Amino acid sequence: MQIHEFKTEKEWLDFRKQHVCASDMPIILGEAKWKLPDGRVKTPFLLWQEKLGLFDLSCDNVATRYGKSMEEPARQAYNAMIFDKMTPAVITNKKYPNFMASLDGLSVTRDRAVEIKNANAHDHALAKEGKVPKKYYAQLQTQLLVTELPMIDYFSMHQGEGIIVPVERNDDYIELIKKKGNAFWELVLDLKEPEMTDDDYVERNDAWGVIAKGLWDIKEEIKGLEKEKKRLEQLLKEESFGCNSRHGNYRFTVVRAKGGIDYSSIPELEHVNLEKYRKPQITKWLLNFKTKLGEK
């Protein structure tokens, strides 16, 4: 494993955008629904946008600020319980270059790691039973992937009480993490959007719905007119027998133009990166009507 150090928080945040982080995996696998400041749930699509720098989706609220402020006291409490000193560390591994892990604690000998959570009452009760909340399991297993350790401690802190839950490495689950994490990163590199879910949409009021219905009805009417337009065009072509034709003030003219260039067939461009010649991004809005689950 390799440990990275950063001079500023911005350097660390930029480094996160270049990797699949351990805390990203619960989102990619759909096992956690973290709320954003605007009320949306953080989905693979929004995470994809964050990695590309399209939006700043960092969560800054009372809960996250409290968690950050309490992390060091919790780490000190954990250190006292295990009679060792653990320090934060950002880790990567050459075997798994797409992944990184921000550990809340790593021992000097690099053979023990901990993930600290200032937990709510429900999650802390699970820790007392020796269980890890499902929303954190993928994060812990990704940390085990990157560190290659056989086990990691999950430390739950609540109202001054600390509970240590040892979490063993799950190789089958880690294979899933590698598969899904690498697939997500390919989408980032290829600029291909992940499939969106209902959580990627903000529910609006009835006034918005009236506007959407009005637009939808017009689009459907236009669609019907386009279908009729194509039918009449085809019929007129057949009745023109390949010749420019007229009747009274109506004129039907054959117009021919050069075809577009197939750049993929040009040998000289085979190894040329054409991305730097791409025009600025075009933003489009598409209105769909969803009648049932999975149908657009």
Image: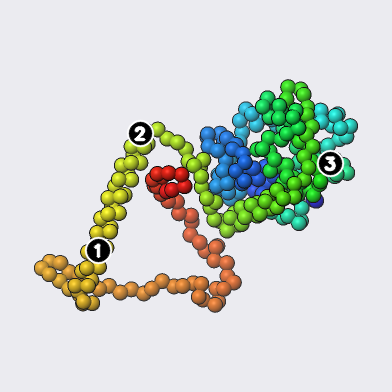
- The percent coordinates of residue 28 (x first, y second) are 61, 46
Q: Report helix, strand or loop for mark 2.
A: helix
Residue drawn at x 24%, y 66% is 233
Question: Which of label 2 and label 3 is nearer to you?
Answer: 3
Q: Report helix, strand or loop for mark 1.
A: helix
Among the two numbered marks 2 and 3 on one chain, the one whose residue lies closer to the N terminus: 3
Q: Is residue 295 left or right of residue 186?
A: left
- The percent coordinates of residue 9 (x first, y second) are 69, 40
Q: Amino acid at mark 2?
A: Ala
- The mark tally for this picture is 3
Please indicate, yes or no, whether residue 164 appears anywhere in the rendered image.
Answer: yes
Outermost residue, left side: 248
- The percent coordinates of residue 116 (x first, y second) are 75, 34
In the rendered structure, are the residues bearing label 1 and label 3 in contact, judged by CB atoms less than 8 Å apart? no
Q: Which residue is mark 2?
A: 207
**Crowd tier of the residue under label 3, counting other residues whose Cα lies within 10 Å: few below 14, some 14–19, many 20 or above:** some
Q: Which residue is mark 1?
A: 231
Q: Report helix, strand or loop for mark 3.
A: loop
Question: Which of label 1 and label 2 is nearer to you?
Answer: 1
Most foreground residue, 107 or 145: 145
* Location of residue 52 with respect to 108 vertically, above or below: below
Among the two numbered marks 1 and 2 on one chain, the one whose residue lies closer to the N terminus: 2
* Location of residue 265 with respect to 193 vertically, above or below: below
Q: Which residue is mark 3?
A: 112
Res 31 quadrant in image? top right
